[in-house]
C-alpha cells in the first residue's frame, strides 16, 4: 500500500470518528448522556483531520487556495502540515530511518 493511500485511509477513518463523536456530543448537550470530554475529543479530531487533509491535497498537487481559505485568526499549523507531508511522502525505508534517528535524538536528549 502506498503512503498516500495510507493517508487517505486515515482521513476516512478520522471522518467517521468525527461524525460519531459529534453525534454523541450533541446528545450529551441535550442531556441524554453524561459523557465528559467529548468537546475536547471532537476539537482534537477536527484539528487533526484538517491538517492531514491539507497535507493530503498538497501531496496530490493542489494549491492551498484550492484547498481552503482560512480566516486570519484561524491559520493552520504549517510545521505540523510539513511533518505530515514528510512522513507520508517517504518510502517505508525512509520512515524507518527517520524513526531510528528520532529515537536516538530523544535518547541523547534525555
Image (spheres, grey):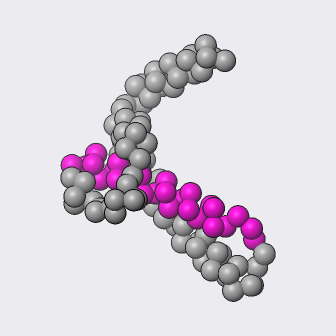
What residue is at 67 percent from the left and 67 percent from the top? 38
Q: What residue occupies the far top of the structure in this picture? A: 108
Is residue 77 one of those drawn in magenta?
Answer: no
Residue 8 visible? The answer is no
Nearest the eye: 77 or 1:
77
Image position of 104 (left or right of 30): left
As displayed, is residue 83 above or below residue 15?
A: above
Q: What residue occupies the far front of the structure in this picture? A: 73
Residue 97 visible? The answer is yes
As displayed, is residue 108 above or below residue 56?
A: above
As displayed, is residue 7 above or below residue 96?
A: below
Q: Which range is magenta?
A: 35-62
Q: Position of residue 43 (x, y in %)?
A: 56, 62
What residue is at 42 percent from the left and 25 percent from the top? 93
Nearest the eye: 83 or 16:
83
Is residue 42 one of those drawn in magenta?
Answer: yes
As displayed, is residue 23 above or below residue 67?
A: below
What residue is at 25 percent from the left and 54 percent from the top? 64
Q: Position of residue 104 (x, y in %)?
A: 57, 16
Q: Residue 1's image quarter?
A: top left
| Number of numbered tags placed on the structure image | 0
Q: Position of residue 5 (x, y in %)?
A: 38, 49
Q: Position of residue 48 (x, y in %)?
A: 49, 54
Image position of 51 (left or right of 69): right
Nearest the eye: 89 or 41:
41
Quadrant that contains the C terminus: top right
Image position of 56 (left or right of 64): right
Q: Main secondary structure of the magenta part?
A: helix
Q: What residue occupies the far right of the structure in this picture? A: 34
What residue is at 43 percent from the left and 42 percent from the top? 80
Amino acid at each position: 500500500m502506498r503512503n498516500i493511500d495510507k493517508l487517505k485511509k486515515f482521513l476516512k477513518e478520522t471522518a467517521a470518528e468525527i461524525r460519531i463523536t459529534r453525534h454523541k456530543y450533541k446528545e450529551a448537550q441535550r442531556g441524554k448522556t453524561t459523557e465528559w470530554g467529548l468537546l475536547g475529543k471532537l476539537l482534537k479530531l477536527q484539528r487533526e483531520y484538517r491538517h492531514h487533509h491539507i497535507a493530503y491535497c498538497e501531496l496530490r498537487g493542489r494549491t492551498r487556495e484550492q484547498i481552503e481559505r482560512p480566516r486570519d485568526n484561524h491559520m493552520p499549523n504549517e510545521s505540523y502540515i510539513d511533518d505530515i507531508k514528510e512522513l507520508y511522502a517517504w518510502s517505508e525505508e525512509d520512515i524507518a530511518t527517520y524513526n531510528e534517528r528520532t529515537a536516538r535524538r530523544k535518547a541523547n536528549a534525555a
